[in-house]
Amino acid sequence: MGKLDGKVAIVTGAASGIGRATAELFAAEGAKVVAADWTEAQGKEVVEAIKSNGRDAVFASVDVSRPEDVQAMVRTAVDRYGGLDVIFNNAGVEGEQAITADCSLENWDRVININLKGVFLGMKYAIPEMLKRGGGSIINNASVAGLVGFRGIPAYCASKGGVIQLSKTAALEYATQGIRVNAICPGVIWTPMVERFVGDSAEARKTFEALEPVGHFGSPEDIAAMALFLASDQSRFCTGAPFVVDGGFVAA
């Protein structure tokens, strides 16, 4: 038996990195998965990979900053699978690198709209469907950048700090109605986002790896494993918490 047998789960940002690893793990553990992303070709590839392993998944095209897209994504889960038990609001962007006074308004709006508003919309439209099922698990992907400051990415830090506080608030609001809301705070994980920061520079890679006390990057699978715990009934007494998966970064 899988840890998510009989559950229906949405994973946003499912086309690559943490989202892909989580969608595949959820499916392997028995969930019916809506793999949502704005990158259609890669998202459908993930769905086909899941199906090739005998599991059930469907792709949903979504821009998480658009209410109508997020509503349609949730409807896909309900219409296809009969309800919704889990949502992993994972989609996010890093934005441009610039210190606060030089951060463009366009960059600020884009990062906040995707990283924070997108999480809000995911919860807003998922919660009513979860209440119909008697509860569910909401997992929001934040970051250690929501716990400590990083120079040059003010919008990203603000968005991830907001995700943590939004998760705590919703956790309190729905604690007696069977809905658990938690945040994951990854450290430096080797994903396409981190690859864009590092580029082709071996020196930059060593610099980023040195940020982690364990001496190496985390993997998307490390975060997927935490998401699985939070999606499953094993975490039934966990709500309103930021779960740090960072190789010791914030302890340093």
Image (cartoon, helix red, strand yellow):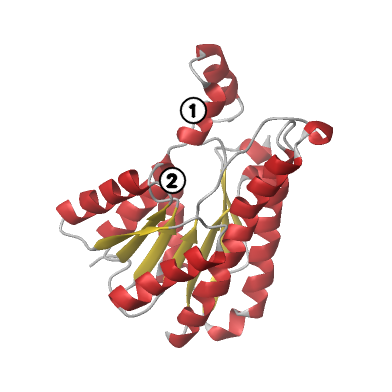
Name the side, left or right, on which 182 lies relative to 20.
Answer: right
Residue shown at 36%/70% (left/top)? Answer: 76
**Quarter of the image with the C terminus in it:** top right
Q: Residues within 10 Å of mark 1 (few under 14, many from 20)?
A: few
* 222 is higher (above) or lower (below) than 231: above
Residue 133 visible in the snapshot: yes
Mark 2 residue crowding within 10 angstroms, few (<14) / some (14–19) / many (20+): many
- The type of residue carrying mark 1 is Glu
Say which residue appears at 80% left-offset and 31% top-offset: 102
Q: Is residue 224 left or right of residue 180?
A: left
Q: Secondary structure at mark 1?
A: helix
Q: Residue at x 75, y 42 (%)?
A: 105
The residue depicted at 84 percent of the width and 34 percent of the height is 101
**Quadrant in which the N terminus is drawn:** bottom left
Mark 2 — residue?
Answer: 18
Question: Quick check: can you spot residue 190?
Answer: no
Q: Is residue 153 left or right of residue 232?
A: right
Q: Which of 169/11 is in front? A: 11
Q: Give residue 140's position: percent from left, percent from top.
A: 55, 59
Where is residue 50 drawn, in percent x and y?
A: 23, 53
Q: Earlier in the sequence, mark 1 or mark 2?
A: 2
**Residue tagged 1:** 195
Report the amino acid beneath label 2. Ile
Closer to the camera in the image, 70 or 231: 70
Task: Using the numbered discs, state the Cα–Cα distance from disc 1 to disc 2 in whole angstroms.
Answer: 13 Å
Q: Is residue 84 above or below residue 34?
A: below
